Image (tube, grey):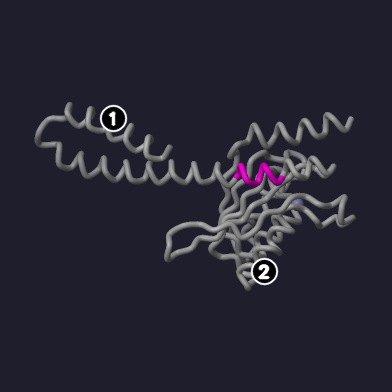
Amino acid sequence: MYISFISRSITDFCEAYRQIDGRKKSSTFVLALKIFRIQSLQSFMTLSHEKYMRMALQQAQTAKETGEVPTGCVIVRHLINADTYEIIARAHNQVELLKDPTAHAEMIAITQAASAVGDWRLTDTILYVTKEPCAMCAGAIVLARIPLVVFGATDPKRGGVTSAFRILNHPDLNHRCDFISGVLEDECRALLQNFFRDKR
Ligand SMILES: [Zn+2]
């Protein structure tokens, strides 16, 4: 998929380059290469975000099958030497099973990830979750120093990132966390809506 994106972009670029007059070709070429590189990286990251969000969706599906609110979470760690990511946590909501109000997918995944890393600071990680984290989970994400959160559906009533509260980039906290919302949003939202509709 990534390769086909690159070859399609190169074809488009070559066609545009043929139509530029001689003197401007050199600087245009350098600029185009820069833009192409950024776009390729963004496209690659989008594909990666979708890949890990699909894994989080599988976790959410497991939650649904066991009668839990269907939320799933995956945490990956950047391996700098290999320039790749490894999965260090996968979890789903287990509030009903454990009879524990804190057993949200993100909380369980953060504990797993800290254990895998051997440190409470999860500074080289990305957290993927199907639903916007609540205030509790957003607080834990900040405490864990997670630099990036990617989530699917927003939670307009209780969300702790962009909806009810804005905890991840709150100016009074000592750590800021970037976020990307709306990755596989329709699928994440449909899973939640179907669950609550079936419960009624
Ligand atoms: Zn939560």
**Image quarter in which the N terminus is found:** top left
Q: Residue at x 16, y 30 (%)?
A: 20
Q: Is residue 80 left or right of residue 179?
A: left
Q: What's under tag 2, amino acid-wise?
A: Ser
Element carrying mark 2: helix
- Of residue 68 and residue 127, the one placed in the foreground of this image is 68
Question: Where is residue 135 drawn, in percent x and y?
Answer: 74, 53
Total numbered labels: 2
User: What residue would you read off at disc 2?
Assistant: 115
| Label 1 or label 2, whichever comes before in sequence order | 1
Marks 1 and 2 sit apart, C-alpha to C-alpha, by: 47 Å
Q: Is residue 16 left or right of residue 177?
A: left
Question: Where is residue 8 drawn, in percent x and y?
Answer: 33, 32
Question: Where is residue 19 drawn, in percent x and y?
Answer: 17, 26
Q: What's under tag 1, amino acid-wise?
A: Asp
Return the residue found at the far left.
22
Q: Is residue 48 left or right of residue 98?
A: left
Q: Residue at x 74, y 50 (%)?
A: 92
Q: Quadrant of residue 168?
A: bottom right
| Residue 80 drawn above or below residue 153 | below
Q: Is residue 106 left or right of residue 42?
A: right
Q: Residue at x 20, y 40 (%)?
A: 29
Element carrying mark 1: helix
User: What residue would you read off at disc 1?
Assistant: 12
Q: Is residue 159 magenta?
A: no
* Image depth: mark 1 or mark 2 in front: 2
Q: Which mark is residue 166?
A: none
Circle 2 packing at 10 Å, graded few (<14), some (14-19), many (20+), is: few
Segment tinted magenta in the rendering:
53-59
**Image quarter in which the C terminus is found:** top right
